[in-house]
Amino acid sequence: MCASPMRIRESKLKDLARLRVGEHPIPTLKSLLKLVGGRVPLLLEIKVERDIWRWVPALKRELLNYDGPFGVMSFDPRISRLLKTNVPEWRRGLVVRDSLTAVRRRLAIWLADPQFMAVDRAALGKSWVERVRGRIPVYTWTIRTVADRAQASVHADAPIWEGDGRPRI
């Protein structure tokens, strides 16, 4: 997102503050929540490596008093499972790549028990996506063009745009 090889878990906040998103410093979750102030729904993606246990307490600390709508999602199904166990009132989702094998996908969905899914745009129109969509909302990523948006409007409940959300032609 910031074209930097830095890893958040290995970095100090003062070093991360030097990173830029466009013309602005990368926000902390706390500053993002304050900026948004509940005016629009947030979809927060948690990226993990081996550090799944630190996420729920960190998220609870920031989100418990947040008044706006939000959902938390991750490629790692264990995050959704931890959220279900520790903060079941939060909306939780699973992010799924099209390249995931059917067995790994089924296992991830079973373990995550998500309330929504975000699927790779390449998976749109596939029968497994339609089956999932019959049970829970399906969002799709990454929408970059007007054509992508047209495809998403048929096969998904909402698009997840890249960048500032303006379609590229």
Image (spheres, helix red, strand yellow):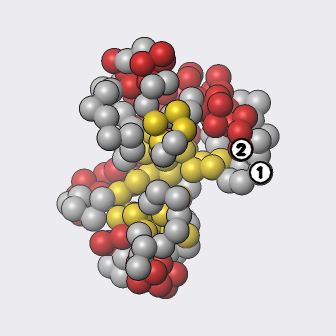
Residue type at the position of mark 2:
Val
- Percent of width and height locating residue 30: 64, 28
What SS does tag 1 mark? Answer: loop
- Percent of width and height locating residue 131: 43, 75
The residue that label 2 is drawn on is: 36
Quarter of the rendering occupied by the C terminus? bottom left
> What residue appears at the point 41 percent right and 69 percent down from the top-left corner?
144
Horizontal side of 47 relative to 104 (left or right) equals right
> What residue appears at the point 72 percent right and 34 percent down from the top-left corner?
34
For residue 123, say whether it is visible: yes
Question: 142 or 107: nearer the eye?
Answer: 142
> What residue appears at the point 71 percent right and 54 percent down from the top-left corner?
40
Given contact means CB atoms under 8 Å apart, are the residues at marks 2 and 1 in contact? yes
Residue found at the very far front of the displayed protein: 23
Residue type at the position of mark 1:
Arg
* Residue 63 higher or lower than 94, as above or below: above
* Residue 110 higher or lower than 63, as above or below: below
Quarter of the rendering occupied by the N terminus? top left
What SS does tag 2 mark? Answer: helix
Q: Which mark is residue 39?
A: 1
Quarter holding residue 124: bottom left
Is the residue marked by circle 2 packed among few (<14), some (14-19), or many (20+) residues within 10 Å? few
- Percent of width and height locating residue 160: 49, 63
Horizontal side of 141 relative to 68 (left or right) equals left
Total numbered badges shown on the rendered structure: 2
